Each structure stands twice: as structure tokens, then as C-alpha cells.
């Protein structure tokens, strides 16, 4: 018995060493030096002629001194472009990918596909997300732990996509009508404090990085915002998440769920429209992040016919958008920290950063908008020492854009030319095609 155990322990060590060696290969020992014409580091500095030295997937230094480029380093010349930290989208649904099969409403596609098929297809959305300059996402809601599978496949290098922080099932109140002979999957359904505790613990046990709770009605073309969970249920979810060192995001379309979510101590509040002044003041005081997700309703207006929404969806959504924008404007003015969340779903992957255009409309400078997708978003993830900045010790997530992102936010939305994630180039559109 003992010998067998020893042998298996040795085998585990050998395997661990072997996998470490295997992991080292893709990132490599080689050093890279990336030159940018301008570099916004999200630490308050705009560099001219910056050189970012990258080693083992991390940023070793930022300099303007070419003589400090180590001998033998691979030099990547992006001096015609501006550099930014890899962007972070704090609200996605990567596993709700749909293609554009003609005649099949996108909603039906999601219901009809097995989980394994859905995860495989989702790699396309993951690639489009990277192409938008988004190297990290916080994914807020999936079925059958597809998000955990996708996160792990990406971390193993089997799928190319943004680094994912995932929640498993979001918690929701019982809302399915009774159907004889059909038992809906347990998923995230939880009613009352004991069930909330159980379902939060279940997500943590399954490997979730963050907890998500649906604190109000409202999704897709339904823009009602009736509070679903009580304050006590929200408090139980928040406290249990925090007990295990996890953060929590609470969804509320309307002001009542928002008020209770903030009082309960949520780390971020998603969507919330028409918030009262007291709630906004409380968010500013507590440092609660607000993720307005304004642009996703614009996407629904543009694509609702293909998604399969009920008639009248455009009017409902179009009435909601200005209220959403106005709430964001009031919150920003009151000193609330905002983070960029797209709520990307269906075919929206790649449009993640359009949210920043709304933030500028809400009163931000382009630089303040970029902070919502870098330093603020990293702080919301609890990764402010690893992500969201170009500085020594940070993961080497870098984006090159054509133009000046600090004078025009559209440069970040439409002119991403090159992306590095963890020291590896994952997008490169800098090579000019013949004739250009
Ligand atoms: Zn969402």
C-alpha cells in the first residue's frame, strides 16, 4: 500500500514537472521588446516612444531607453501606433454565442444546442472579443458550467480567447411555470436565505471565481425592473461570497433592487436604471462599482428581429436607453466608480468597447472612459496588481490602436490593430495587404 502510494506520489511530481515544462513552451523564455509611438499606461502617464520589455508573459519594464533592450530580444515595432493596457470587460456571457443561421431565431439556437456544441462554437466569439482589444472578461451567467469549461480550456491554451473570471450559475428566484412531467434543471434557482446560502456555496464548490445574483426582473427585450430578491436574501449572498473571498455582482434593472443590493454590500451593481440619489450617494461612499451596460440595449434594438423578440421591442428598449444613460451620468458626477461591461451575448462579441462611447456621452473624457475598462475593472476583479495597467510585474496584456485614444474614444472602438495577451501576440492586423 505504502509503496503504491509513494509510487503514485512520485508519478504526480513527475507529471507536475512535465506539465510545468510543457506550459513554459508557449510563453517561452524569450524576451520581447515592443515599441509604441505613444503609450497610455493607466497609471497616469502618457509615454512618447515607449519600449515595453516583456518576459515570461509579464511586463519586466517600461522605458524610453533603447539601450536597455536586452541582447537577443525580439523587437516588435509598433511605433506607428498607440499602446494601451489590454482591456477588461466586466460583464459578458461568452457561452451564449450564436451564429447567424438564416431563418433560425438566435434565441432558439441557444435552447436547442448541447452544451459541448455551444462551448465549441463560443471560440469564435472569444476570438472576436480579443480582436476588440479585450484580453480579460468577467463572465456573469452560464448554463451547465460551460463558462468554467471555457475558462479552463483558454487557460490551458486549447482555446484562444480572453482570460475569463466566471460565476457558474447566476442566482435567480423560482420563475418557471409548472409543467407536468418536466423538472427544470436546478441551476441557480434559490428562494429564501437557506437556499441562497446553498446555491452560492455550490457555485464556489464548482469553481466559480465570482458570484452573480439576479436581483430584479429585466433581460433581453423585457425591461421591467421589479425587485426579485429581498434585502435579507441579497445580504446572505453577499456575506457568503465574501466569507470565501469571492466578489459578487447583483443585477437590477430597476431602482428598488439596486437600493437593496448596495445596502447589502454588493461589489458591483449591473444595469441599474433610475437609481435614487440616496442609493447613488451610498455607492460613492462605499466604493460600489456601477456597470450600466447601456450599449447592450442598442445591440438588442439593432438585432431584435433576428434574436426573435416580441413585437414592440424597439419601443421598449429605446425608452430604456436614455434613462440608463442619464443614471450613468448622475452616478459618474456623484463620484461613483464605473466599470465597462458590455453584456455581450448572441453575436455581440467584438462590440464590447462600444460601451465606452456611451460613457463619453455620460460626461467622461476618453481617458476616464478608458479607466473604466482598465484600472477600475481590474480593481473590481481584485486584480489591480496584475491587470489593467502597463507597468513592471503586470501581465503582458497590450493593445495597439491607430490614432490617439485620449483625444477620440472611437480610436479604441474601431482601430485596434494588434493585441498581446500574457506575452503572446493573439491579434495582428498591422501587416498591410499589397496595394494599400
Ligand atoms: Zn448579463
Image (cartoon, rainbow, N blue to C red):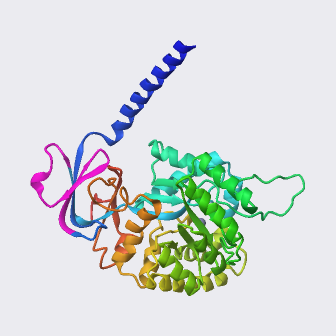
Highlighted range, magenta: 47-74
Image position of 327 with respect to 122: above or below:
below
Quarter of the image with the C terminus in it: bottom left
Residue 318 percent across, percent down from the top left: 60, 84
Q: Is residue 368 left or right of residue 29?
A: right
In-front residue for pair 157/139: 139
Q: Residue at x 51, y 20 (%)?
A: 8
Q: Quarter for ligand 1?
A: bottom right
Image position of 254 with respect to 251: above or below:
below
Q: Is residue 185 left or right of residue 74?
A: right
Q: Identify the residue at the far right of this view.
A: 180
Q: Is residue 28 left or right of residue 364?
A: left
Q: Is residue 69 magenta?
A: yes
Could you tell me if residue 82 is visible in this image? yes
Could you tell me if residue 98 is visible in this image? no
In-front residue for pair 162/13: 13
Q: Residue at x 54, y 62 (%)?
A: 92
Residue 221 percent across, percent down from the top left: 67, 74
Q: Residue at x 45, y 74 (%)?
A: 337
Q: How many marks?
A: 0
Q: In the figure, residue 136 lies in which quadrant?
A: bottom left
Q: In the figure, residue 93 lies in which quadrant?
A: bottom right
Q: Is residue 127 magenta?
A: no
Residue 37 percent across, percent down from the top left: 20, 66
Quarter of the image with the N terminus in it: top right
Q: Identify the residue at the far left of this view.
A: 67
In-front residue for pair 164/130: 164
Amino acid at each position: 500500500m505504502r509503496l503504491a502510494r509513494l509510487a503514485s506520489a512520485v508519478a504526480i511530481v513527475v507529471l507536475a514537472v512535465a506539465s510545468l515544462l510543457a506550459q513554459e513552451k508557449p510563453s517561452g523564455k524569450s524576451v520581447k521588446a515592443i515599441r509604441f509611438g505613444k503609450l497610455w499606461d493607466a497609471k497616469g502617464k502618457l509615454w512618447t516612444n515607449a519600449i515595453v520589455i516583456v518576459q515570461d508573459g509579464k511586463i519586466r519594464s517600461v522605458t524610453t531607453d533603447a539601450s536597455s533592450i536586452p541582447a537577443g530580444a525580439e523587437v516588435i515595432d509598433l511605433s506607428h501606433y498607440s499602446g494601451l493596457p489590454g482591456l477588461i470587460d466586466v460583464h459578458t456571457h461568452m457561452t451564449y454565442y450564436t451564429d447567424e443561421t438564416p431563418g433560425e431565431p438566435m434565441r432558439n439556437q441557444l435552447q436547442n444546442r448541447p452544451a459541448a456544441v455551444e462551448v465549441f462554437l463560443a471560440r469564435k466569439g472569444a476570438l472576436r472579443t480579443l480582436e476588440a482589444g479585450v484580453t480579460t472578461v468577467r463572465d456573469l451567467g452560464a448554463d451547465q458550467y460551460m463558462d468554467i469549461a471555457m475558462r479552463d480550456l483558454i487557460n490551458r491554451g486549447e482555446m484562444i480567447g480572453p482570460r475569463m473570471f466566471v460565476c457558474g450559475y447566476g442566482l435567480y428566484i423560482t420563475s418557471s411555470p409548472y409543467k407536468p412531467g418536466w423538472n427544470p434543471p436546478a441551476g441557480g434557482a434559490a428562494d429564501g436565505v437557506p437556499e441562497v446560502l446553498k446555491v452560492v456555496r455550490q457555485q464556489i464548490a464548482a469553481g466559480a471565481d465570482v458570484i452573480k445574483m439576479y436581483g430584479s426582473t429585466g433581460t433581453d427585450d423585457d425591461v421591467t425592473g421589479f425587485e426579485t430578491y429581498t434585502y435579507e436574501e441579497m445580504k446572505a449572498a453577499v456575506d457568503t461570497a465574501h466569507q470565501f473571498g469571492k466578489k459578487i455582482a447583483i443585477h437590477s434593472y430597476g431602482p428598488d433592487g439596486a437600493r437593496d443590493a448596495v445596502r447589502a454590500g454588493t461589489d458591483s451593481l449591473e444595469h441599474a436604471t433610475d437609481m435614487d440619489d440616496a442609493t447613488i450617494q451610498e455607492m460613492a461612499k462605499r466604493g460600489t462599482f456601477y456597470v450600466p451596460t447601456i450599449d447592450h440595449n442598442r445591440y438588442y434594438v439593432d438585432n431584435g428581429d433576428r434574436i426573435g423578440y416580441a413585437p414592440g421591442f424597439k419601443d421598449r428598449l429605446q425608452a430604456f436607453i436614455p434613462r440608463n444613460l442619464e443614471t450613468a451620468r448622475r452616478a459618474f458626477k456623484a463620484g461613483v466608480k464605473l466599470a465597462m461591461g458590455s453584456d455581450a451575448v448572441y453575436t455581440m462579441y467584438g462590440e464590447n468597447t462600444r460601451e465606452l462611447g456611451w460613457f463619453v456621452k455620460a460626461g467622461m473624457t476618453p481617458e476616464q472612459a478608458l479607466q473604466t475598462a482598465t484600472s477600475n475593472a481590474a480593481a473590481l476583479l481584485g486584480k489591480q496588481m496584475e491587470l489593467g495597467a502597463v507597468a513592471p510585474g503586470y501581465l503582458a496584456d497590450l493593445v495597439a490602436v491607430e490614432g490617439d485614444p485620449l483625444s477620440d474614444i472611437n480610436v479604441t472602438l474601431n482601430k485596434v490593430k494588434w493585441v498581446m495577451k500574457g506575452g503572446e501576440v493573439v491579434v495582428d492586423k498591422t501587416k498591410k495587404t499589397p496595394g494599400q
